[in-house]
Amino acid sequence: MYILAEISTLAVIIFAVFVGFVLFLSFYLGSKAKSSSGYFAAGGQIHWCVNGISFAGDYLSAASFLGICGMIATMGYDGFLYSIGYLAGWIVALFVVAEPMKKLGKYTFTDALDSKYNSKGIQLIAAISTLVVSVFYLIPQMVGAGALVTPLLGFPHWIGVSMVGIIVITIVATAGMASTTYVQFLKGSLLIVFSIILVICTLNRGFTTEPKVGGIEDFYKYKSIEASITDGKVTPADSSYSVTKEAHEKTKDGKKGKTFLKMEKDGIQGWWLALEKDGVVTLEETQWVTTNSDATKIINGAPESEENQLRPVGNCEKILGKSGDEVKQGSVGIFEFLSIMASKDTIVRRWGTMPGAGLEGIDEDTKIYYPIYSAGNEIMRPGQKFKVQGTPLQKLNFISLMLALFCGTAALPHILIRYYTVPSPACARKSTIVAIGSIGLFYILTLFMGLGAMTNCVINLESSNMSAPLLAKSFGTFLFAVISAVAFATVLGTVSGLIVASSGAIAHDFMDRFMAIKMEDKQKVWAGKLAAFAVGIVAIILGIAFKGMNVSFLVGWAFAVAASANLPAIIMMLFWKKTTAKGIIASVLVGMVSALTIILLSPSMFERYGLPKADAVIPLDNPGIISIPLSFIALVIVSLMTQKKD
Amino acid sequence: MLHEPAAQSKSDPASGFKVSLGAWMFLFYAIIYIGFVAINVSKPVLMEKIVFLGLNLAVVYGFGLIIFAMILALIYNALCTAKEKELEGKE
């Protein structure tokens, strides 16, 4: 059996060296940065090229590396839509926001927003908005940290999250933006270089219908047996199997759902999926986990152990209509790789999840992972996750997400504060261009890494977030160790930026400006460090609570809140002369509250609460399409109502 | 407390040109992005169509949006830098 949690000494050493170097750098820079300008904005003296790569380090978060690759690995092209939306958002940042933000601000996004008004209301509401967006963004980073550390070091999720929290608090509390910048520069560079190496390895390996499981063990051939249906009852053709249980998917509106059979042969039980195609019925072998009342688990019919874990999955059943030895061996080119994947004659075995609660006729706490056969032409266009061919509401959800991704980047506080670390507006512009180049290159690579994971039998059924590092593992321990260390650095870099942004919101916007607490420069730095510590603790708690959710999906929410709360105010402040302080306050408040309300009442959150998704008060998962226009409308109405009389 | 930027910068006579150029380029890119979303929602099957080198429309349009953003960014920088040099010292 494949051992998922195999711990590599090399991985641990590389990981420890990297973390040690990052901490050394932080303490070294910390001994130099003593002023609040140094702490919050690295003295405004970072070179634009370093800042550009640091932008990439800041932006290419766990959502990008772990979440997008994981979503492409399980859902195909739909995951790549995040790459497109995230990159497109930089156009807004470059053309609309970069130089004005640099000219107007000092340390934080609130400074720029408030530059024309000196309003206590703006200082307070923008500080709150910064905190809310940063916390929403922090959650997926911490979830990603936990997902990484488990296979790398063998620790449980909560220890991984706590480790990241403690290291990041140390980085930020020592040297603030200076250490954060260099951690991000290092991480951004390494991430792009090693992603290129991983893609080259993937293309060099080419295609096979029988990849080694996890890159280690021989391919596991899942069984498929003929069956028949009589009076709605499924019977296997092979009489050596005896059916012990039959379970049907619970569906709405009387639609026919999936049927699963529990069958026994030679004393071993297993769940099988009944598939009917062109009048032919087959039973397909699944993987499954039953959790007993004493929390022990049965996996695929045997007790859970180090050896008995769920097998990694993901492979092509047919490649251009061929399988086994008929498939062309050897490396493939960039275009050839994508064209093979997009062919209708390429069939991929993906996997779906069916919780026991979704089935009738099953009383145990069982989760079944079942095969889905998808043609390449369907995988390589939208539709697997985002139901673009579905109901108008499903289409609206998709439009809403793409809108939030486009508008969210230029409104993320931890991205905006990076404009204050360079000496001039021209440097802000140039660093944004370096960011677009490096981030764009990385996002193109995500499609290859995700599809590589999809077809190389490396996907962990319980969490897609580790797909890219596990793809690296299939090429050997060294690449896995380095990629995992880089992925961990990815989390460190982004979380550091978020905590600097949050500590700026508390210490600079709220304490210094809104409450006007008299503080010496050194005291401001201390206030920032204490705020960083508090936000770090909150991040640890949330990272543990949200274990298991796809990190890219969670980041989509952070973008929606940022785009709704901040972007309308930034754009109108820059381009509409009638904008007033009260208009900005109303815009941030309405955008933030409406986005949060829709998220908290959405189907995905209802599922998180343990309630049926169908009972969600608001059927939308992505709030942007409603909350962004609402924020603009609020600003216009309130600004017009509060014009100064001549 | 004083509320000046972290690093002081000179006055920028090219500012108006850059704002206007940025707004137009943003609109141009936004239209192409909207086109991508519109095709996905209205005719998703069209995205399967092979365009060239065996690549389908989804991949070509998706890569195109990323690469086009890079090209636009370089053009924007070149035009802004040229204008900054042209107007240097005029204000």
Image (cartoon, coloured by chain):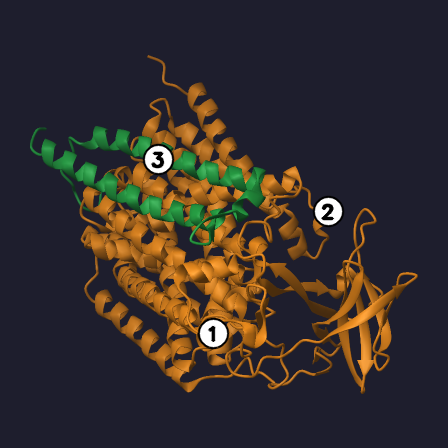
Chain colours: A orange, B green
Label 3 CA crowd tier, 10 Å (few <14, some 14–19, many 20+) = some
**Do dots 2 and 1 share one subunit?**
yes
Label 2: chain letter: A
Pointer 1 residue: A329
Q: Nearer the viewer, residue A460 or A39?
A: A460
Residue type (three-letter) at the residue carrying disc 1? Gln
Residue drawn at point x = 37 percent, y = 58 percent = A442
Where residue A566 sits, quadrant-wise, is: top left
Q: Is residue A347 left or right of residue A435?
A: right
Q: On screen, A293 above or below A319?
A: below
Contact check, label 3 and label 2, Cβ < 8 Å: no
Q: Quadrant of the N terminus of chain A?
A: bottom right
Tell me the SS state at disc 2: helix
Residue A72 at x, y = what percent? Answer: 51, 59
Label 1: chain letter: A
Residue B35 at x, y = what percent? Answer: 47, 36
Tell me the SS state at disc 1: loop
Outermost residue to the right: A231
In the picture, the disc for residue A615 is 2
Q: Is residue A66 visible?
A: no
